[in-house]
Each structure stands twice: as C-alpha cells, then as structure tokens.
Amino acid sequence: LFRSANAAHSATTRDAVGVVGLDLPAAAADFGVALVHEFQHSKLSALLDIVELYRPSSRLFFAPWRTDARPVGGLIHGVYAFLGVADMWRSLVADPDRFPRALSEFAEARASVTDALDSLAGAGLLTPAGERFLAGMRAGIERLHEVGVPGPVEAAAQRLLAERRAAWREANA
C-alpha cells in the first residue's frame, strides 16, 4: 500500500460481516478511517454474497492506493472502501484545527476514487447490477466534487495520483 511504514493495519474477513481487526492507530482520524474503510469492505462482501457485480477476468488494473495490480474484484472493493474514506475526510474538513490534514486527505481520496471509477466504467466487466452499483458510486463521488478544494491542494492531489500511477507502471510493466 501507499502508506507509511508506521501506519496502523486493519482487515476484515468476508465470512464475518462487521468484524474488523486493527492495530491501534496513532490518531483519532486514522482510527475513523480504518473503521470506515473496513466496514465498507464488510458491507460490499455481504452484497457480493447475494448479487454478482462483475464478471471474472484475468485483467489487472491500477488502483491508486496500491502498488500491485488488482483484479476487477479488488478494484471495486477499493473504490467502495475509499469512497467511504473520502466522505469521512470531507466531514473532518469542517474542523481544520483538530484535523489539519483532512483537506489534503480528502482531495487525495477523491482524486483516487474518481480515477478508479473511470477504470471500472471502462473495463466492460460489470454485470447489470454492477453497472447500477457503479452509478451509485458515481453519484457519491459527484457529491464529493461539489465540495470546494483550493487549487493548490487539488493540484497536489492530482500530482500525487500521477506519481502513484507512474510508480505502479514501473512496478507492473
């Protein structure tokens, strides 16, 4: 993952909806991010038990939050998880004194989700239910794009996304 070595780790299991395992993060915002991220995975896993959102494929994709190439199932999981993370950072932007990095984290997550949604949309691997799910995620990210972000913060998020894509291409050539 594109994160620091001292970042907390978290995980869910597909077979136990709502169960989250995690290290104790250093900051309250990081704890919230971990919980939101993992609960998004848990909800999506439960949904995937009852509806097929994508067709199996050997194609691999760039996911802005990972260094490895991801299958379509991994990409959709990441998009859904980081859509929740972006929304959480959006809510923390309102209190910059307590959460000074919220604006940059929000801009980065929003840019990453937007990029990955475009990959999903262009993959041709979603079922009709997956297309409806994608439309819902698109509506969610469109709402997040209504939140104003200063130009330099947005530009930094776009630069980071481009750097991650370049690093990914080098690692997955």
Image: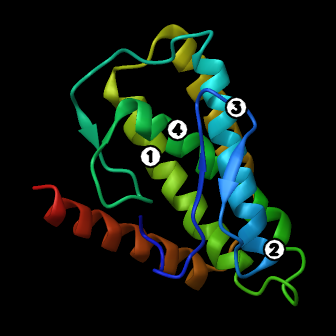
x and y, in percent, of residue 167 in the image: 24, 69
Query: Do we see residue 124 in this rendering?
Result: yes
Residue marked by disc 2: 93
Q: Which mark is residue 77?
A: 4
* The quarter of the displayed image where residue 19 is located: top right
User: What type is the residue that disc 3 sits on?
Assistant: Lys
Q: Residue at x 41, y 67 (%)?
A: 161
- Residue carrying label 3: 43
- Which of the marked residues, 3 or 4, is nearer the chain's N terminus? 3
Q: Which amino acid does the dot numbered 2 rest on?
A: Val
- For residue 95, what is the image quadrant? bottom right
Say what amino acid the circle numbered 4 marks: His
Residue 122 vs 99, above or below: the answer is above
Residue 55, placed above or below residue 93 = above
State the separation of the CA atoms marked 3 and 4: 10 Å
Rendered image: mark on residue 47: none
Q: Camera-side residue: 36 or 107?
A: 36
Quadrant assignment for the C terminus: bottom left
Name the residue beneath numbered marker 1: 116
At label 1, counting other C-alpha atoms closer than 10 Å, the crowd grade (few under 14, some 14-19, many 20 or more) is many
Q: Is residue 148 visible?
A: no
Front: mark 3 or 1: 3
